[in-house]
Structure formats: C-alpha cells, structure tokens
Amino acid sequence: DSDCCTFGWDSFCIDHVETVCGLNVCVRACEHSLCEVGGPLAATCNDCAAAVCQSDSGCCNSTWDSSCVDKVEIVCDNVKCQQGGTTCETAVVVDYNETQTLIGTLEGMPQGGCTSEGSSCSNAATWYSITAPYGTDYLRQVWTCGSRYSFGLDSVLSVHTGCPGEVGNEVFSNDDWKWGPYPSACAAHWPLRWKDSGVVVPFNIPGGQNYKIRISHWGPSPESDYQLYIPEPSSALLGGVGLTTVFALSRWRSRRRGRIGSG
C-alpha cells in the first residue's frame, strides 16, 4: 500500500501490520475482563476501562478491585457484566428493544453448536436469546465491536431460529464484519477492526420469533473475553426491502475474505 509512505500512516496501514508482517503487536488487549477482579488495567485497552479509571485512578494504578467492577455498569454507557449461557438451551435472555453492551468470556465455555462460517464448530461457545416481538418493523444489529482491540478475541457470531444452534437453523453468520453487508459498523474500533463480527436479528415472523445468538471464536484465536454490542434499533436498515431480502442477506458469505486469508 504505497499510500502509507506517500500520504500518511492511517488505520489501513496499521491493519497491514498483521496481514503483511504477520505481527499482532497492534492488539492492545486488556489483561483481564472489566468484570473480573485482578491487576490494574491500562486505560488505553478499552473505552470503558478509561471511563472507570477516570472515575477512580486506583483501578489503573493499583488494582482492579470489586469497586472498579461495580463502576463498569455505573460510568460506562449501557454496559453490563452479563455472561452468556453455557448451552443453546440455557441461553441468557436479552431485551430486543434495549441498547446495551454485554461483557462475558469464552474461557471455560464448552463447545456447542455450529455455523457455516468462521471455522468455529469445534470451539468454545456461549449463548444469548432474543425475541423479536409481534409488530416489530425494524432489525436489530448485534456486534462484537471492540472485542478484538480490548481482549484479543477473533470472534464468530451466528443467529439461529432454535436449538441446537447449528447450520440447519442458521439465519445469519459472520466472522469478519468488514466483509459483510454493513461494512462501516465497527469502523471506529481499530486496529484489526475486521476481526470483530456482526449479524442481524430480523424483524418478527407473525406471532413473534425467538432467536439464539451464538458467540464463538475463529480457529486458533484465544478463548478470551468479548463484548456483545446491541445498538439502537434501526428501521433504516430495512431500506424498503422485505423479509425475503433479509433472509437472502443471511446467506451472504464473506466473499472477499480471500484477500486477507482465514480469520
């Protein structure tokens, strides 16, 4: 990318550090979850960590104790410490209408379910459950934006119509969101921003529809922490298209992933 030396070293040049050089030096991962007591965290590892440390400098200078964990849900906008379920059947229920960021971990989670993308079928997984109420006319996006930057996770997301959450009942799956249908969603989370994932929870089928959200990780990525981001509902995503088009999008695979290889 000659522009890196001709015009400026922008976020795309930083991305090339991994893809061209094979280095992971740009991952400024937090040493442990924001929802876990432990050593001090660097304020630069996560936006929420920065907010907590601004409220209490000891969280970054001394130790990340229980008071720091408590502050996560107080000073960080719509952030909750809410671990996903260990199986599809025990998926943790989240509100379809609420904007929120849920922090959990894949560490210690069992293998379960499968998706057609991301080489994650034999990897650890955790589960959430979300229901599109009757009369809903907007889509919900679900992302792991910032998980790679904060915790080093190369996530894989999928949405299923029931249990077991496998390819046969998969509605939408995504490994690297940059190659999916909404290529600007996680643009603010860089470097290595395409390692986060994004899926769509469709609007309701008559009578309401429950979906299972599976979070896993690509191939050799570590079983680390994640943040599941559910932004504000948006009817604009429909763009005048119908449910048929939505489900056609659900079969959109990462056509351009060959440019950067697996993961």
Image: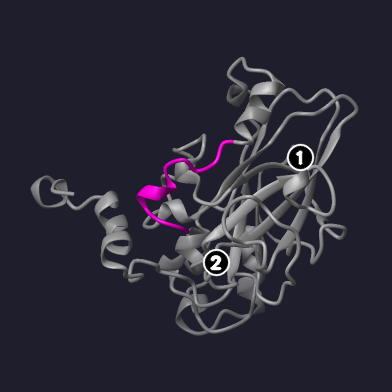
Q: Residue at x 55, y 41 (%)?
A: 253
Q: The residue tagged with tag 2: helix, strand or loop?
A: loop
Q: Position of residue 49 (x, y in %)?
A: 51, 66
Q: The residue tagged with tag 1: helix, strand or loop?
A: loop
Q: Position of residue 219 (x, y in %)?
A: 55, 66
At label 1, the amino acid type is: Tyr
- The disc placed on residue 96 is 1
Q: In the image, 26: left or right of 39?
A: left
From the viewer's perspective, is residue 16 above or below residue 111?
Answer: above
Residue 78 in view (yes/no): no
Is residue 257 found inside the magenta-colored segment of the image? Answer: yes
From the viewer's perspective, is residue 84 above or below residue 34?
Answer: above
Q: Identify residue for label 2.
A: 219
Which segment did they paint magenta?
252-263
- The disc placed on residue 234 is none
Residue 187 in view (yes/no): yes
Q: Residue at x 50, y 80 (%)?
A: 40
Front in this rendered view, residue 32 or 161: 161
Q: Residue at x 63, y 28 (%)?
A: 248
Alpha-carbon neighbours of circle 1 within 10 Å: few (<14), some, or many (≥20)? many
Is residue 2 found inside the magenta-colored segment of the image? Answer: no
Front in this rendered view, residue 228 or 263: 263
All told, the count of numbered labels is 2
